[in-house]
Image: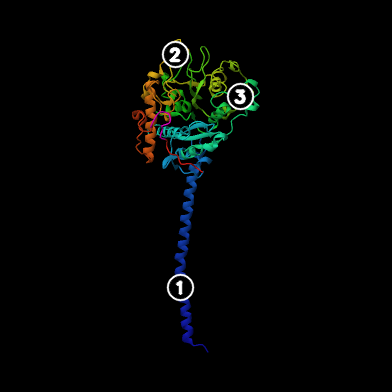
Amino acid sequence: MRNPDRSSSSSSSRQTIRSSSNRTRAPFVLRIGSTCIIALFIHLVLFCFLLLLLPSLDREDAPGIHLEQVRVIPTTETSVDGVGMPGPNAAAAADISGEKATIAYAISVTSCGGREEGITDGTAVLAYSIRRQKSQGSKYNSKLYAFVHPAAKKCSSPLIDMGYDVQIRETPINATEIKGEFLRRTIQVRGCCQEKELLKLYSYALSEPVAVHLDVDALILKPLDSLFDAIIDGVESSPLDTKDMELHGNSSLPGQVDAFFTRDYNLSAKGKLAGMQGGFLVVRPSMKVFEEYRRIVLEGKHYRGSGWDRKGHGGYYGAQQIQGLVAHYYDFVRPGTAIELNRCVYNAMIDAPRNRQGLCRNGERECEDCRAEKVENIMSAHFTLCQKPWHCTNHRSYPRLCESLHREWFRARKDLEIESGTFVEQKGEHNPKIFLGYCKSHMRGYIPIKVKRQH
């Protein structure tokens, strides 16, 4: 028989538990409902944000992220006992931050012959002079490329440390497949680098809006923005002055500029066409143009003396390679799409304007003497006639302007070392006012930058 008091107590207890359970269930349900509402609101906000964002990703002028930009590459690499250079992806990454555009700067390395300083010190100082344009007021970013022939692969590793995107590439054409017998035979034995100089044509195959190809013995002194503006925005939108161009006769400015270059009048014979100077070429990249060059070379219609298609670009040094090929292309294949620049200002080599007969080498009645140009007016230099800075030249037989340009190169080298925190005062006694202590003696007395090798 159950105890009535116990039963009553148990019943009362169960009612109390149910009542308590009902009281706790209501707030729990409210909490669950509130959480769901908040989550739904957050998802709705994110969905609306994505709807606003997606149209901007489809615009051609949207910054975009390319495959090369998402490669895991450090934006700063350390080399040369700590000399820091931007990694090959630094410029592309900066493009995302809202800069106007990235300009491609390329060099070509065809062999490991010659003095090592050209591949190490020359490329290091050139890279620095390209990068410092930003601190000089340029609105453009830069990305460095190195087109390296397989024959030069073993000496190209320092370029990686210096921030170049090293691309091992075969020559764009197989010389044995050239149809014309004369070109097939001579392109492989003439010029500075034979058919391997055509590596420079890969500048047209780059993805940037503008590509600049330079020789390793070049130096940028001032921003080249006016050239880039002309190609990207149109020549009417560029501050480029006509005094910086070579407008022959009744020639006018092209409606669309696809290239800038200088000519080398020192190599052309009297009355003959002059080829372009192979150490400086600014182009609008185009795979169509790249393939046109390949077709022209493989057809091989280059003849002794009369040159490409018998039009006149032949008979001078480099006529079978870049000097003659590019000049022929913009003079006859695509005329009116390129501008010849004033060689006293761009790609300055400090050459004499007149031949031994006193006639202007460019065929004009009057010609500017580049040897009298002021260094502060020069945009870029090319150390050919003035000799390479690392040769520690005696300047007695060279124009005074060569001294000034050599001093600019050594200042750039010093600034590079100061910027990287590796500067050590050098005590070389050979013309220290020009060489800043980096030359102990003439020719073989150069004190090189120490580049850490990649193994």
State whether residue 189 is above or below residue 14: above
Report the mark closest to the observer, 2 or 3: 2
- Find disc 3 in the rendering and name its residue: 297
Q: Residue 346 at x, y = what percent?
A: 43, 23
State whether residue 8 is above or below residue 285: below
Mark 1: amino acid: Ser
Report the mark closest to the observer, 1 or 2: 2
For mark 2, give the secondary structure. Answer: loop
Residue at the location (47% across, 63% down)? 29
Relative placement, left or right, of 305 versus 51 is right
Residue at the location (48% across, 15% down)? 251
Specify the segment rendered in magenta.
440-447
Q: Residue 402 at x, y = what percent?
A: 39, 23
Residue at the location (42% across, 26% down)? 380
Residue 417 located within the stretch drawn in magenta: no
Label located before the other in sequence (2 or 3): 3
Mark 2: amino acid: Arg
Judge whether residue 245 can be spotted in this image. Answer: yes
Which disc, if any, is residue 291?
none
- Find disc 2 in the rendering and name its residue: 354
- Find disc 1 in the rendering and name its residue: 19
Neighbour tally class for label 2: few under 14, some 14-19, many 20 plus, Cα within 10 Å: some
**Observer-nearest of 266 and 48:** 266
Report the mark closest to the observer, 1 or 3: 3
Label located before the other in sequence (1 or 3): 1
